[in-house]
Amino acid sequence: MDHAADAHRTDLMTITRFVLNEQSKYPESRGDFTILLSHIVLGCKFVCSAVNKAGLAKLIGLAGETNIQGEEQKKLDVLSNDVFIKALVSSGRTSILVSEEDEEATFVESPKRGKYCVVFDPLDGSSNIDCGVSIGTIFGIYTVKHSNEPTIDDVLKPGSEMVAAGYCMYGSSCMLVLSTGTGVNGFTLDPSLGEFILTHPDIKIPKKGKIYSVNEGNAKNWDGAITKYVEKCKFPKDGSSPKSLRYVGSMVADVHRTLLYGGIFLYPADKKSPNGKLRVLYEVFPMSFLMEQAGGQAFTGKGRALDLVPKEIHQRSPIFLGSYDDVEEIKTLYASESS
């Protein structure tokens, strides 16, 4: 590789250029979505910078409050939430914001209102901050029916009605994975340029994978279908090799690996959490949207994840997502359990 020549390249596919190219396919487009996305990207860069220097800046540790989920808030959680709320409101393209950290939805005041609703988890996996494990931001975007009179029903819609979804992972590199409904693309932040560059075009998840990802500490509380599935992963009776267990405990990291390498991510309901643990709007839906766009599946134990209609903004659900064939096995097990 000619690094000297590479250093002067200006024909790189940045995320801004990529979105503008997509926008040009729609002559009626006014660029609202492009502007909104540029503000989300700015928020991700800001949080990435804060995460990278968290230890030095004393941003690690508890902020002394609990969020709506009853989880203690880390200082970085609070900072990230503020960053994204300000970035989204200042875009002038949003009407309603739903954050994991806020009990109520934020309704943007009239002069700054636009036609989009954004649901987001500003810092997913934050319990892992102190030990340096990959964490991330998850987001989904809806359009409102009437931006002059937005209501909470504009976000309480099936995930299939999202117009875009993505996540930004803050790890050994900072990577933003995005789908606007026509496939999935991954962009890596080049710190020297301060730009996200297209590094993973048109991500497709393998049809079947060799990895399963689940918190086995909850095994005693699982239902029969999951117990059977995990047993099959470890001790296959068809002569195939066992699946490998990989579980980080940070949804962004676990789903990212599943998306690239294949396999399945499981967060089932159990006796302790009969409704599941992960939140529908800003965890289950965006990740399910990305999985389907990459050729995988997402299942709740009862049906397609994106067909769920949430009744409240912090509703929870079980979720199984990943390679098409692996999720198909889970669906078959649940069908035989209920018959």
Image: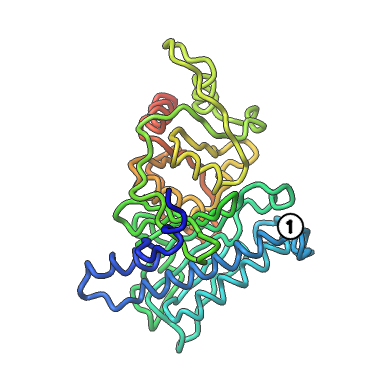
Q: Which secondary structure, mark 1? A: strand
Q: What residue do we see at 49% from left, 53% from top?
A: 280
133 or 111: nearer the eye? 133
Total numbered badges shown on the rendered structure = 1
1 or 196: nearer the eye? 1
Q: What residue do we see at 36% from left, 30% from top?
A: 325
Q: In this view, does 231 lie above or below 105?
A: above
Image spot of residue 20 (x, y percent): 32, 69
288 or 193: nearer the eye? 193
Q: Mark 1 points at which residue?
A: 72
Q: In this view, does 53 lie above or below 38?
A: above
Disc 1 residue crowd, few under 14, some 14–19, many 20+, Cα 10 Å: some
Q: What residue do we see at 39% from left, 31% from top?
A: 331
Q: In which quarter of the image is residue 273?
A: top right
Q: In this view, does 203 lie to the left or right of 61?
A: left
Q: Is residue 123 above or below residue 222?
A: below
Q: Is residue 152 left or right of residue 79?
A: left
Q: In which quarter of the image is residue 18?
A: bottom left
Residue 339 seen in this snapshot: no
Q: Is residue 159 left or right of residue 133?
A: left
Image spot of residue 223 (x, y percent): 55, 29
Q: What residue do we see at 21% from left, 75% from top?
A: 28
Image spot of residue 284 (x, y percent): 48, 50
Residue 198 seen in this snapshot: yes
User: Which quadrant, please, contains the C terminus?
Assistant: top left
Q: In this view, does 174 lie above or below 330?
A: below
Task: Residue at the far bottom: name it.
Answer: 111
